[in-house]
């Protein structure tokens, strides 16, 4: 019988907190700059533990984002699965980058996430979003060093490998 990996509850807990932060009420002016919490957490865990967190995790968390935010079912699931795939594909390179270069990579991945979600949204006939639609990717990029250090400290503290 296979034993569950050590720290799976911590990983799941970080995704749960990211999902809660995604639906947490905010003032109107802050809604437009809300970071992509789930995307940030997914990218971190794909970089840190590529053998444990992957495309399936991206798909499931994307479905949860779709359910919680009321978007078309599968819209964020597809986008986050693609983000997880690309992160896994390049994880060995990105892990070697300094944190500021990782932040630029995170920006590209999260813009791709938003672009794929926008593509689905436009495909079903929704109107084009305003220019600040792209602000969460920039906010997430700016928060990446903090998220990276926090999750790395959490991973090391709980000895998750």
Image (tube, grey):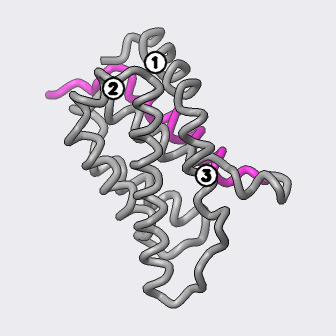
Residue 120 place in picture, x, y as percent: 43, 77
Is 18 placed above or below 79 here?
Answer: above
- The residue closer to the viewer here, 161 or 119, is 119
Q: Name which of mark 2 and mark 3 comes first in the sequence.
A: 2
Residue 43 within the magenta-colored segment of the rendering: no
Q: Secondary structure at mark 3?
A: helix
The residue range painted magenta reads 1-25
The percent coordinates of residue 137 (x first, y second) are: 55, 50
104 left or right of 57 in image: right
Q: Which residue is mark 3?
A: 136
Q: Residue at x 63, y 54 (%)?
A: 135
The alpha-carbon separation of the residues under discs 2 and 3 comes to 23 Å
Task: In the rendered structure, find residue 26 and report the number of the disc placed on it.
Answer: none
Left or right: 125, with 32 as reference point: left
Name the residue: 28% across, 43% down. 54
- Of residues 74 and 123, the one drawn nearer to the viewer in this rendering: 123
Q: Quadrant of the C terminus?
A: top left
Residue position for label 2: 48
Main SS of the magenta segment? Answer: helix
| Mark 1 and mark 2 residues within 8 Å of each other at the beta carbon | yes
Residue on which the image places disc 1: 152
Can you give x and y, in whole percent of width and height, for residue 48 in the image? 33, 26
């Amino acid at each position: 019988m296979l034993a569950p990996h050590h720290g799976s509850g911590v990983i799941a807990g970080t995704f749960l907190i990211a999902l809660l932060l995604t639906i947490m009420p905010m003032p109107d002016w802050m809604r437009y700059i809300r970071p992509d919490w789930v995307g940030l957490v997914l990218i971190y865990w794909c970089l840190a533990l590529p053998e444990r967190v992957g495309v399936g995790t991206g798909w499931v968390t994307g479905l949860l984002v779709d359910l919680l935010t009321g978007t078309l079912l599968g819209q964020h699931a597809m986008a986050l699965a693609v983000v997880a795939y690309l992160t896994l594909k390049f994880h060995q390179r990105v892990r070697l980058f300094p944190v500021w270069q990782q932040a630029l990579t995170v920006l590209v991945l999260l813009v791709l996430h938003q672009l794929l979600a926008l593509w689905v949204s436009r495909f079903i006939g929704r109107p084009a979003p305003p220019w600040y639609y792209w602000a969460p990717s920039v906010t997430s990029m700016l928060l990446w060093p903090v998220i990276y250090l926090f999750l790395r400290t959490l991973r090391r503290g709980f000895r998750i490998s």
